């Protein structure tokens, strides 16, 4: 039996992002296609999350292992948006009566789309899926190399509530190390435009652990970021993953050379001293700012509809998506397969994972515990009919190690526990899912 304390002691707390469970590397082809109409028939549909994936980028960043294609031909983008609408029309029929509690547009780089293409995309949300863009909290992801003032104004007018932009570093050398071309003068002007556009929430992404990054250069990026008054900051530790540009040229660091623990601690102290509250290991929100996507949607329980290639959808017992890949030839082949689907094909799921009762409990635990709000033990009991600490005895060990504590009805990570979120989260991954993730061959 594995020992929790030894696991925490012997492993770097920087494992990999744990933003979903189970991870797509645990997905496999189903033995037989799953009829989506039958799958969704008995599911709650009054608070769904709607996501559209735009798998295109101007350039592939050196750290990125997302499902994306760089430099797409205009005809490919045109065909993709047309197919996205077809898929949405099928899902509208599959779902029948439903309500969207919140939505997002991600990728890839959705801001790569032209104004006309953005209009086509949002028509899918409004005309096909019946979403009131101004009423349902929505998020949009952007990159500075694909933005201009006209797109920013358009997105604000469409009612986007959370605008998120990936800067990664305000130091030119570090940005280049990440494979990004974003002259700071032009980037600063775009950030001023975003601030002036009046989005209810403006998020800015930064990365720490970049080769050559120092505590001084990291502090500089944090200071420059705050000059634009973001409501949220996402701070990502650099993870070098297979098949990425960095993986091909980066020599793994010895533990004593890893700056990420010091840079994380610096950022926590820096932001908290300037009025930001930590929501997770990565998310910091300005005090008094409500989450832009605060709604009745519960990511632990409610369903998700993903539109587009590699977009994840899930019900209580089944998660599904197209195949995941990183390398350009395989990504391109999966996109072409998506473009070749008939309307009838979209009524079936062929690739994903069926969750056991234990994995549904693990999912609820992980998605709750790694957030500052923590795990609401009473609600867990209501959902599963059992006590979380009886189901997961290592929660008591977390408390003994002062990585978590009971606060009223919640079990919450301490500051030390929050710093180890990814490591703690990976501990609670179920053995069958772990085995599938180990067996996955990146391609």
Image (tube, rainbow, N blue to C red):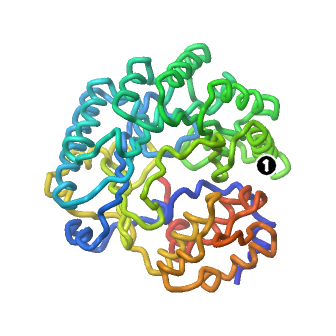
Determine which quarter of the picture holds residue 109. Answer: top left
Q: Residue 441 versus residue 68: which sits nearer the camera?
A: 68
Q: Residue 58 versus residue 411: which sits nearer the camera?
A: 411
Pinpoint residue 412: horizontal percent, then vertical percent: 68, 66
Does residue 254 appear to the left or right of 98 in the view shown? right
Task: Point out the residue furthest to the top here.
Answer: 185
Which element is circle 1 on? helix
Does residue 425 appear to the left or right of 157 in the view shown? right
Q: Is residue 440 visible?
A: no
Crowding at dot 1, Cα within 10 Å, few <14 / some 14-19 / many 20+, comes out as some
Residue at the image point whose x is 67% and y is 52% from the top: 281
From this view, report whether residue 67 is shown above or below residue 2.
above
Q: Residue 237 versus residue 291: which sits nearer the camera?
A: 291
Determine which quarter of the picture holds residue 120. Answer: top left
Judging by the rendered image, the residue that carries numbered circle 1 is: 261
Pinpoint residue 18: horizontal percent, then vertical percent: 58, 58
From this view, report whether residue 20 is shown above or below residue 153.
below
Q: Residue 154 versus residue 171: which sits nearer the camera?
A: 154
Task: Point out the residue furthest to the right here.
Answer: 256
Residue at the image point whose x is 74% and y is 72% from the top: 398
Does residue 245 appear to the left or right of 152 in the view shown? right
Pinpoint residue 100: horizontal percent, then vertical percent: 32, 53
Quarter of the picture holding the N terminus: bottom right
Residue at the image point whose x is 81% and y is 68% from the top: 402
Residue at the image point whose x is 49% and y is 80% from the top: 382
Determine which quarter of the picture holds residue 434. Answer: bottom right
Pinpoint residue 129: horizontal percent, then vertical percent: 23, 48
């Amino acid at each position: 039996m594995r020992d929790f304390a030894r696991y925490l002691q012997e492993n770097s707390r920087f494992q990999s992002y744990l933003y979903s469970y189970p991870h797509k590397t645990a997905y496999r082809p189903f033995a037989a296609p799953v009829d989506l109409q039958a799958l969704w028939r008995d599911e709650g549909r009054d608070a769904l999350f709607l996501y559209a994936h735009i798998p295109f980028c101007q350039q592939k960043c050196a750290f990125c292992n997302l499902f994306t294609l760089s430099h797409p031909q205009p005809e490919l983008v045109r065909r993709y948006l047309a197919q996205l609408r077809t898929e949405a029309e099928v899902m509208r029929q599959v779902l029948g009566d439903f309500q969207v509690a919140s939505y997002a547009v991600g990728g890839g780089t959705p801001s790569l789309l032209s104004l006309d293409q953005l209009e086509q995309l949002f028509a899918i949300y409004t005309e096909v899926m019946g979403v009131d863009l101004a009423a349902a909290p929505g998020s949009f992801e952007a990159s500075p190399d694909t933005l201009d003032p006209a797109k920013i104004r358009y997105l604000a007018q469409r009612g986007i509530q959370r605008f998120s932009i990936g800067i990664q570093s305000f130091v030119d050398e570090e940005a280049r190390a990440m494979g990004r071309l974003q002259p700071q003068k032009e980037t600063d002007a775009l950030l001023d435009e975003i601030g002036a556009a009046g989005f209810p929430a403006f998020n800015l992404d930064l990365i720490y652990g970049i080769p050559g990054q120092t505590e001084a250069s990291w502090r500089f990026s944090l200071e420059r970021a705050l000059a634009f008054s973001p409501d949220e900051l996402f701070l990502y530790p650099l993870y070098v993953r297979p098949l990425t540009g960095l993986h091909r040229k980066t020599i793994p660091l010895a533990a004593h050379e890893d700056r990420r623990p010091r840079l994380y601690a610096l950022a926590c102290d820096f932001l908290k001293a300037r009025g930001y509250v930590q929501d997770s290991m990565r998310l910091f929100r300005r005090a008094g700012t409500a989450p832009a996507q605060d709604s009745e949607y519960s990511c632990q329980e409610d369903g998700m509809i993903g539109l587009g290639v590699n977009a994840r959808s899930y019900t209580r017992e089944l998660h599904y998506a197209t195949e995941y890949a990183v390398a350009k030839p395989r990504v391109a082949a999966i996109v072409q397969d998506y473009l070749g689907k008939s309307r009838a094909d979209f009524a079936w799921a062929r690739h994903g994972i069926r969750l056991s009762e234990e994995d549904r409990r693990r999912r609820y635990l992980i998605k709750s515990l790694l957030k500052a709000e923590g795990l609401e033990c009473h609600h867990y009991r209501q959902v599963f009919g059992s006590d979380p600490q009886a189901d997961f005895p290592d929660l008591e060990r977390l408390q003994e190690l002062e990585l978590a504590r009971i606060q009223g009805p919640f079990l919450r990570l301490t500051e030390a526990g929050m710093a180890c979120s990814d490591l703690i989260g990976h501990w609670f991954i179920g053995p069958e899912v772990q085995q599938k993730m180990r067996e996955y061959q990146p391609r």
